[in-house]
Amino acid sequence: MATFIINQDVTTDTPTVEVTIDPNNPLPPGRHRFRLIVVDDAGNTSAGDEVSVIIADIDAPTAVLNAPSIVGTGKSFNLDGSKSFDQGGGRVTKFVFTYLGPNLVVSPPIITRPQIVTDPVLTNLGTTRPPIGVTTPVLTPSTGPS
Ligand SMILES: [Ca+2]
């Protein structure tokens, strides 16, 4: 029995150890990695060997939904939940399908043609920036040879 804390070694003189889980503070579902390093009687240290343990909810089943990715307009199609499973050994007895509405489509930004301004003095009143598409030449007074 041992309480494991991330990156904190648990050293034993036996080859197996129990990862003791506090039911009030369980490992969250997902992949958790553990490493073993062994040391021989001469003090030589091995490289590490790692395993990954999947912590899963074994009471609740897992839903797996399949459907055709493209369906012609006006055509009926099937939603398929048959790949759903119950890891804990039970069986799935009810399938709850819900239509969640259309996917949100993010439109590309609208590209407009730059406005061509022929008279920047008359169309640029009240702004300090030249309109898009107009290049204002910068005139620098000559200060003589430098
Ligand atoms: Ca179950």
Image (tube, rainbow, N blue to C red):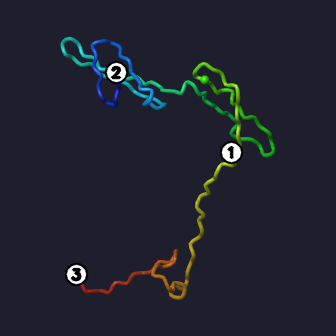
Cα gap from disc 2 to disc 1, whole angstroms: 46 Å
Q: Amino acid at mark 1?
A: Leu
Residue closer to the observer: 136 or 39: 39
Which residue is more in the foreground, 8 or 76? 8
Residue 143 in percent (x, y) is at 26, 86
Q: Which residue is mark 2?
A: 2
Does mark 2's beta carbon lie closer than 8 Å to ligand 1? Answer: no
Three-letter amino acid code of the residue under disc 3 = Ser
Quadrant housing the N terminus: top left
Q: Position of residue 97 (x, y in %)?
A: 71, 37
Secondary element type, mark 3: loop
Question: How many C-alpha atoms fall within 10 Å of the one at disc 2: few (<14), some, or many (≥20)?
Answer: few
| Comes first in the chain, label 3 or label 1 | 1
Cα distance in 3D space between marks 2 and 3: 79 Å
Judge left or right: residue 68 versus residue 34: right
Residue 15 in the image, given as x and y percentages of width and height: 33, 12
Q: Which residue is mark 3?
A: 146
Across and down, in percent, residue 92 comes to 67, 25
Q: Which residue is mark 1?
A: 100
Q: Classify mark 3 as within 8 Å of ligand 1 or not, answering yes or no.
A: no
Q: Residue at x 52, y 74 (%)?
A: 132
User: Type of residue at label 2?
Assistant: Ala
Given this view, does label 3 or label 1 mark the residue nearer the observer?
1
